[in-house]
Structures are given as structure tokens and as C-alpha cells.
Amino acid sequence: MAVSEDFPVGLRVMVVDDDPVCLLILQRMLHQCRYRVTTCSCATQAYTMLRERQDTFDLVISDVYMPDMDGFRLLELIGLELDLPVIMMSANGETSLVMKGITHGACDYLLKPVRIEELRNIWQHVVRKKGTFDFNRDNCSIDWDSNKTLVEVQSEDHGSRKRKGNIELSDAMIEDANSLKKARVVWSSELHKKFVNAVNQLGIDKAVPKSIMEIMRIQGLTRENVASHLQVVDGSWKCEDKRRIRDEQMHLIMQREHEGIGFPTTHC
DNA sequence: CGGCGAATAT
DNA sequence: AATATTCGCC
């Protein structure tokens, strides 16, 4: 299950929520996004864990309402002692609540039910906070549940894929500290290669966005993404064709001229 | 309705 | 310039 190129695989996320169902759903979605997930059903325990194992988490997502500790309290503690971006989450979208989250230092506020699209880009918060994110630490994701037993080990087979050690910090990523920009698809040569393969596999006439997208099997890549790319690539292909045809015609004309059977041409 | 391609926006 | 979004049309 691949995400678009240059996606920071392996971000270590701690999810805190007293509702086990939410926890599970969140875990699944985050996992789909290729994050490493640690789930915790009680805030005090989460806090202990975060403190004990500093530098083993990159990001915290915490529910607001929890029996043992208010999510805002957890947010406060983390802000005080640890240097981690925290995302607050609740079913209640009251502006006062959201405001409270932000003023207490949350870097984002997610409304339940959380959609996976909202999770895909949360790594940008980590980049913002730390300046960079090394997502090449290792290539296996380990999930833990709150009592520290190993739940699942997922080994990824990335074949020969090579990646840069860090993502670069573009101006676009630094500006606007509050709302996350959608991660734009980058048509790297790798990705473009897959695109071309798909098109060839389909044949020119059947190469429509949906089919191309399905053949490429890149997670997170939408039909629109492909359509947009197709539009420009198709355009340049047509240009190439025109140029080729023009060159061929030119060649023919010159040939005829040389044989003296061409049209009378002006030589100036 | 979904999906396409073209036009338009960012 | 590259990618996303919108729009009108099958």
C-alpha cells in the first residue's frame, strides 16, 4: 500500500481516547496513512508513557473528554514538559472549545468523526514544529496498545525504493501556522513512470483518468490528480506528435525538391 | 448519477 | 510552472 512519493512514512503517533472504538478506528486510519501508532485509553497513562519514552513519539492526538484527565490538562502538561505537537479531538465543535484548544497550544482541532483525509497531512505539524522530519529511521512499524504489549508488526517491502533522508522545508510549509495545506501530489519521475506505464498498458484510446488511477494503485492519488496530470502530459504529447509530423513533412519536401519534382519554392 | 475533458483558479 | 478545482456536457 503505497502513498504518494515523498510521504513521510513511519511518523510515530500517540492516540489518546477513552473510547476504545474511536481508538481502534483512529488506529486503522493512521495505519493506512503509514504512520506508526500507539494507542492509549487513559490520559494519565499516556502522559507517563510520553514522559518515560521521550523521543519515541512525534505527535499526539488526544480526545478532549476523558474520565481520568481532561484533554486540555494533558495538552498543558505536554506543552510544559515535552516538545510535541498535539492535536485535540472531540465531537463537540463549539467555538469556545476549539478556541480553548488552540489557546492552550494545540496545533490542530479535529472534529469527530475524523475522516482519513484529515489525518493524511498531520505530519506537516511535525515538520512545522521541528523544522524537519527524518522519516528514514527504519522501515517497520510497530504498534503498541496501552499496556505495552506488542499488537502488530508490519514490515513494509519497499523494494528498491530510495528516499531522501529528510523532506525539505519549503516556504509553503512554514507559512500559515494554523491550517494545514493539502499535500499536493508531486509527479516525481518515479510516479510519472508509473503513470506512463498505465497509459501504455491501457492503450491511448482507453487511457482515461479513472482507469489510469486504478492501474497505478497509489494510495491517496485521486482521479482528479490523474486527470490534471493527464491534461498537461497529453498536451505535450500532442505537441511532440505535431513536431514529429512537421519534421517528417519537411523531410519529404526537401527530398522532392532535391529530386526536382516538388512544388516551385521560393528560396529566400 | 459518475466520469470525462476543457477551462479556470491557486 | 505545476497542480487543483470547477464546470458543462455526455
Image (cartoon, coloured by chain):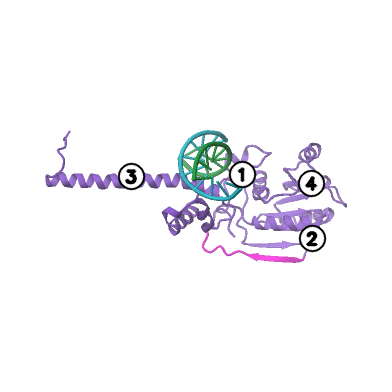
Chain colours: A purple, B cyan, C green
Write the start and end of the magenta stretch as one range.
Answer: A149-162
The residue nearer to you, when weighing A257 against A151, is A257
Q: Residue furthest right?
A: A68
| Marks 2 and 4, the one that precedes in the sequence | 4
Q: Tell me if residue A150 can be seen.
A: yes
Q: Circle 4 sits on which residue?
A: A91
Query: What secondary structure is marked by label 1?
Result: loop
Q: Are marks 2 and 4 on the same chain?
A: yes
Q: Circle 1 sits on which residue?
A: A182
Q: Determine crowd level at label 1: few under 14, some 14-19, many 20+ residues with C-alpha closer than 10 A.
A: few
Task: Please say whether residue A153 is one of the residues in the magenta stretch.
Answer: yes
Q: Circle 3 sits on which residue?
A: A242
| Marks 2 and 3, the one that precedes in the sequence | 2
What number is the disc on residue A146? 2
| Marks 1 and 3, the one that precedes in the sequence | 1
> How far, Cα to Cα, is label 2 from label 1?
31 Å
